[in-house]
Amino acid sequence: MNLSMIWIELLVILALIIANGFFSASEIALVAVRRSRIPQLIEAGRRGATTLAALKENPPQFLAAVQIGVTVVGAMASVIAGAATVAFVEPPLHAVAPIWLDPWVGVIALGGTVVVISYVTLVLGELVPKSLALSRPEQLACFAAPVVSAFARLCGPVVRLLTGSTSAVLLLFGRARVADPFVSEDEVKHLVHEGTEAGIFDEAERKLIHSIFEFTDTSVREVMTPRAEMHAVNADVPLAALAKDLIQTGFSRVPVYRGDLDHIAGVVHIKDVFRALEHTPPPALSEVVHPAYFVPDSMQISDLMRELQSRRVHLAIVLNEFGTVVGLVTIEDLLEEIVGEIRDEFDADEELDVQELPDSSLLARGSVPLGDLHDKYGLPVAETTDYRTLAGFVLARLKRLAKGGEAIHHEGYKMTVVALDGRRISKVRIERPGPRVPPAS
């Protein structure tokens, strides 16, 4: 038995297992590295990042190259291990084995070698490399990319054969190309939720990120100030009276109408009113009015934000499909969808849209969108084409105009009309199912 030959074959087998580990780690790292990070790696001058970008553009190519590498080194390791078993393991076993076991010595030697080689390959050639690749995908991907790219070029014909065969088989499943695994909105939200639980994000950051996603899915009708709550002025009002009104209400801009709200003449700014009052005699209101910007109520607020920014306006008049004025919307309304309620010195005494009472019930304005009540308080109602607000939902259930003190029941919730503004529902008390907390004495 040549001892030096044994060591040489063991070292060759170990080298092949390490090569197997390299290809396994390369596969995981190349798949795990985020596409969005590659431009940053290139800009930082990371070696191998440019090659990595090219490989990520053609996943089937690098996957085929990696699998060729894993298969080839695995087969070579098996062949060498088998030959070593016959040459170096069987003779000693024949010498010590009982006579009745002699016919099975070859099988036992080969089986033992397979178990040992499989164990070492799984640990050093699969599990450890893949774990390292998952923990440091960027570093390993940049390191492996040039080697994998060169190996793919070396095995070009075989790589093309494998990728072509893969595409042909995928056609049987209705897909000729593997879809690029872009991260979905739900996946990002789930990652943010997990990050919050792990302490990476705080609750305010989580809510902010969720609000940004919802920003693109929200229409103007969901955030506008409805027509019934619009503050507008008649075009015939004197400037002095208008200035007093603006000071009392705290509004910096208001719509101006002629006759009724369906005939908006424009929008006036408080600074223009006071500048005009410096002249004697002051001009008519119509001379300081700016053209109004009209938008459909179905417009997405993300699109409206871009329009308001490009037009340099802060207020838009909202129309329905029939051209009727149904409300107004400001930049502040849009920003509040992201950052929450913005309250200034003029809002200090205003009531919140929804108040949580000591007995766990809610006191809500009738104009509160049902979507907000569902998202924030779990109210089991959804907006429809017939109604979008709490007041609309109550009226739809009553099927007539509401009276003070009337109540409806919905899936364990009791909703009571507690205040009316004329015929309009202004306040609703919502009693949630479950035990109620008695008020403090």
Image (tube, rainbow, N blue to C red):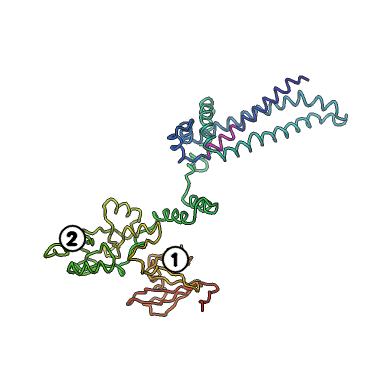
Kind of residue indicated by mark 2: Arg
Q: Is residue 424 left or right of residue 119?
A: left
Q: Residue furthest left?
A: 281
Query: How far from the left and from the top, in percent, is residue 45?
Result: 45, 32
Distance CA(mark 1)–CA(mark 2): 43 Å
Residue visible at 75% across and 26% down in the picture = 85
Circle 2 SS class: helix
Query: How far from the left and from the top, in percent, is residue 356?
Result: 46, 70
Residue visible at 18% across and 60% down in the picture = 275
Residue visible at 56% across and 34% down in the picture = 26
Q: Residue furthest right?
A: 99
Q: Is residue 134 left or right of residue 388?
A: right
Q: Is residue 273 left or right of residue 427?
A: left
Query: How far from the left and from the top, in percent, is residue 136?
Result: 55, 38
Kind of residue indicated by mark 1: Leu
Q: Write down the residue under mark 2.
A: 275
Q: Write down the residue under mark 1.
A: 373
On screen, residue 88 above or below 423:
above
Please provide the residue range marked out in magenta: 22-31
Circle 1 SS class: helix
Residue visible at 81% across and 29% down in the picture = 105
Image disc number at residue 179: none
Instruction: Mark 1 and mark 2 in contact? Answer it, CB < 8 Å.
Output: no
Number of residues whose C-alpha sits closer than 10 Å to that of mark 1, classed few (under 14), some (14–19) or many (20 or more)? some
The nearer-to-camera label among 1 and 2 is 2
The quadrant the N terminus occupies is top right
Query: How far from the left and from the top, in percent, is residue 222?
Result: 37, 62
- Magenta region includes residue 313: no
- Residue 28, quarter of the rendered image: top right
First along the sequence among labels 1 and 2 = 2
